[in-house]
Image (cartoon, rainbow, N blue to C red):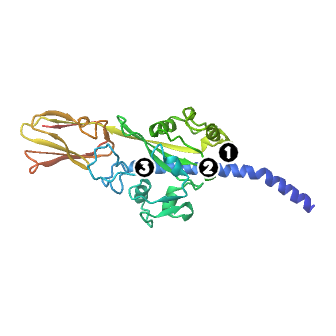
Amino acid sequence: MLLIALAIVGILAGILAPVLSNKLDDAQIRAEQAALAGFRREFEATFDATDYADLNESSLLNSGLPAGTALTTFDQGDSFGSRIYASTVTVDPYGWATKLAQRQGVTGYTVGASYSAASANQYSNLAFNHFQVQRCLVVGPSSETGRQRYLLISLMVPPYRVLQFPTADASQTFDTIWDQSWDSVAAQAPAAWTGLLTATDLALWNSISSNGRTNASRLLVERIVQPKYSLTLANNSQTDWAWVDIGPALNILTAAPNSGTVTSASLDGFTTGILAGRLIVVRRGPSTSAAYEVQRFFLYSDVTLTVQ
């Protein structure tokens, strides 16, 4: 009887083990999706931070920031694939992960130090997912009119699987990931990756790994859009000059008395628009020494300013 009971237990265990494993896998993926959504919200909340060195994530090239501003270090479309599988993360003082860590109040890390997933500290928990694969925040092209795009990526596969990403063109890789649907359990690699990857690497993306999921369906993606807006200054005053800061750039928009209109699109760094969240400060007066502030706001729409 004991042998029969053990046999039944063994059979039940063999039946239940895959079911429980699949449920655990589903739970891990749902948890990672929720984590990425939280990171996205925190990332977007930094756009109106006036501290560009430590908090504001949108310290970007070609965004009209003053010379010397420390730019955020993002992952790039033609190289992030190699970092995903890196066994350690090095704390970059201007890295996107460091800025998010500072926003979360994470302490106890050292700039320049390298942490593995096994470190299991707050910083490594931010950088690595459950499979000890690094999360990446990839910046899109800066030349797009009206928007700046980002991709928050987490690949939910063990490192030994080593799925390859195209590396020939940063914008192309970014766009193919952005345009592809990764949500279905049967998701496939973008068709545009044919010819950019070897047939073996492409087939690995499209093959079933476990739980009936393709490897491609294990690429979790959060798409982030930071709008860009325009700013128009109309100075109709007969006596006063007008100056506008597009924070942290000072006196970036200037209009002489009764000079008509000037637009942000005419300024270097702002031709494709002003990133959402910039602090706008408007001053007027007969001279810079006598100017006084008349308006202050964060830019979250197209705005026309009029000085009478």
Local packing at callout 2 (Cα closer than 10 Å; few below 14, some 14-19, many 20+) is some
Residue named by callout 3: 74
Residue named by callout 2: 157
Q: Which mark is residue 278?
A: none
**Residue under the point 28% across and 39% down:** 270
Local packing at callout 1 (Cα closer than 10 Å; few below 14, some 14-19, many 20+) is some
Q: Quadrant of residue 144?
A: top left
Residue named by callout 1: 209
Work out whether residue 300 or residue 79 is closer to the camera in this orientation and state it.
79
Q: Earlier in the sequence, mark 3 or mark 1?
A: 3
Gap in angstroms between the C-alphas marked 3 and 1:
30 Å
x then y, percent, for residue 233: 19, 37
The answer to whether marks 1 and 2 mark residues whose Cβ atoms lie closer than 8 Å is: yes
Q: Earlier in the sequence, mark 1 or mark 2?
A: 2
Quadrant for the C terminus in the image: top left
Q: Earlier in the sequence, mark 3 or mark 2?
A: 3
**Amino acid beneath label 1:** Ser
x then y, percent, for residue 175: 47, 36
**Residue under the point 48% across and 50% down:** 38
x then y, percent, for residue 146: 35, 35
Work out whether residue 31 or residue 208 is closer to the camera in this orientation and state it.
208
Q: Secondary structure at mark 1?
A: strand
Is residue 186 toward the left or the right of residue 44 in the image? right
**Amino acid beneath label 2:** Val
Work out whether residue 150 or residue 38 is closer to the camera in this orientation and state it.
150
Gap in angstroms between the C-alphas marked 1 and 2:
9 Å
Local packing at callout 3 (Cα closer than 10 Å; few below 14, some 14-19, many 20+) is some
